[in-house]
Amino acid sequence: MTPHIRRATAFCALLLVALLVNAARIQVFQAGQYDANPANRRHEIARYGQPRGDILVGGSPVTGSKDTGEPLRYERTYEQGPLYAPVTGFASQVYGTTFLEHAEDGTLSGADPALFPLWKDFTRAQNAGGDVVTTLDAAAQRAAFQGLGDRKGAVAAIEPATGRILALVSTPSYDPATLSGNGPAVARSWRGLNEDPDKPMLNRAVRQTYPPGSTFKVVTAAAALDAGVIKDLDKRTDSPDPYTLPGTTTRLRNEGGRCANASLRKAFEWSCNTVFAKLGVDVGVTDMARTARAFGFNNTGLRIPYSVVPSTFDTTVDRAQLALSSIGQYNTRATPLQMAMVAAAVANGGQLRQPYLVERTTTRRGATLSTAGAPPLRQAMSPSTAARMRELMRNVVEHGTGRNAAIRGATVGGKTGTAQHGVDNSGRPYAWFVSWAQDDQDMLPKVAVAVVVEDAAADRRDLTGGGMAAPIARAVMRAVLTS
């Protein structure tokens, strides 16, 4: 019997070794393959097996989690979803995440290693999701959303001294909650939102660029002052009306009169295209491009923390194209956030803080994980130029086309704009307004705002006078000043 027992023992040992080798093959060498297999739902079940962390505005959550009792247990919910959709984005069990839900997914889902105490590494227990505290001012966000109403457009508001984003609104909007869960209603909502010609999921504040029109004259005026092309705000310029674009027979005219050889002060107040087109040519493409870059144009790396589409100033233009670029037309394009940055730089003495949206991240119990810190600082123009630009922008509100932005008890500076677009400028003009405001009791401006209204179905005279966009900016600025 002994030889039989030995052979049986050896065979059992061989089977045990084979079992161990196979287990090692699966658990060590093929673990990644099995882990990534679409049929493996363990990670998905674990991800949705606990409530997601919240996104907070003014200390209150604007998101939540609902227990469905299904295998993918918790679905995302949203308080005032359309109001905050351009900030939160959506967290969908089918279609993934966008905006803050995507950029801060590690914190919100509990996957960020900073949330894991040391002993969790051994137990592999799922950690509770953390919270994301935003910089938003709830009153300013609401004022922007209500101001736009059912019109297509966007608003961005920044605190000039810090770069904190106070409002970020895009309309038309949508409710991100309709994309939570994984039932047939979610698929219908997704299809409907993507087929909607008004593109409600497009974040127009940071993901859509527009010709900025006359609001870009803030940049052109700053470039002219910094380059020494203009030394006296009240000296008459050599600017014929009409102005023949260099190298062409095309004549550029103004909407109204009083622009021939106007001073920079009057040209800015009356928004004279001829003066600023010639100024851009006199400054030259090199200095114009340098100033535009200093304000943030042509920056492909801006994140807030999700990405912002670059605003552009074409550096390969001829002199005629430069003239048009300098009045915010031709290839010049800007997001509302970019134009809020332009106004913020003027308000902040020429210094531009990079805008940001997340103040800090915390654990579920409120312990701080990370803070924003001081964002990068850039000198967009000299302090003396910024002082003169504030003076010019105040004149627009006090005496010119921006009177609808005036706020009692505050100093307000602004610039209106009407941007042409479409083939042969056949599209309905975009109405722009950029501005900043300082309470008479404050040492520094508290808010800079940019507003664009796409479907500006109003009398053109109202558009150039700030009839559509300026009242929205005023409401946002007032909300910040009184909060």
Image: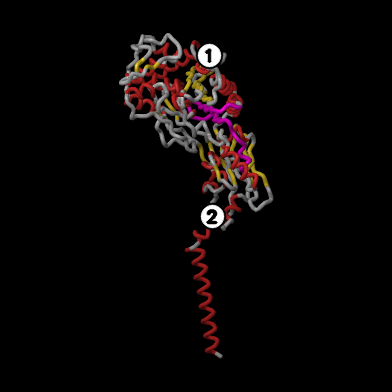
Image quadrant holding the N terminus, namely bottom right
State the SS at label 1: helix
Residue 169 percent across, percent down from the top left: 56, 30
Q: Which mark is residue 121?
A: 2
> Badge 1: few (under 14), some or many (20 or more) residues near its Cα, within 10 Å?
many
Q: Residue at x 56, y 23 (%)?
A: 476
At a point 41% along the width and 17% down the height, the residue shown is 273
Marker disc for residue 403: 1
For the record, the magenta segment spans: 150-179
Type of the residue with mark 2? Asp
- Secondary structure state at the residue bearing disc 2: helix
Q: Give the label, 1 or 2, closer to the camera.
A: 1
Residue 162 is covered by the magenta coloring: yes
Where residue 227 appears, as percent x and y from the top left, is: 33, 20
- Near-viewer residue (225 or 309): 309
Q: Is residue 452 left or right of residue 277?
A: right
Q: Quadrant of the C terminus?
A: top right
Q: Are marks 1 and 2 in contact (CB under 8 Å)?
A: no
Extreme residue in the left direction:
247
The answer to which image quadrant residue 250 occupies is top left
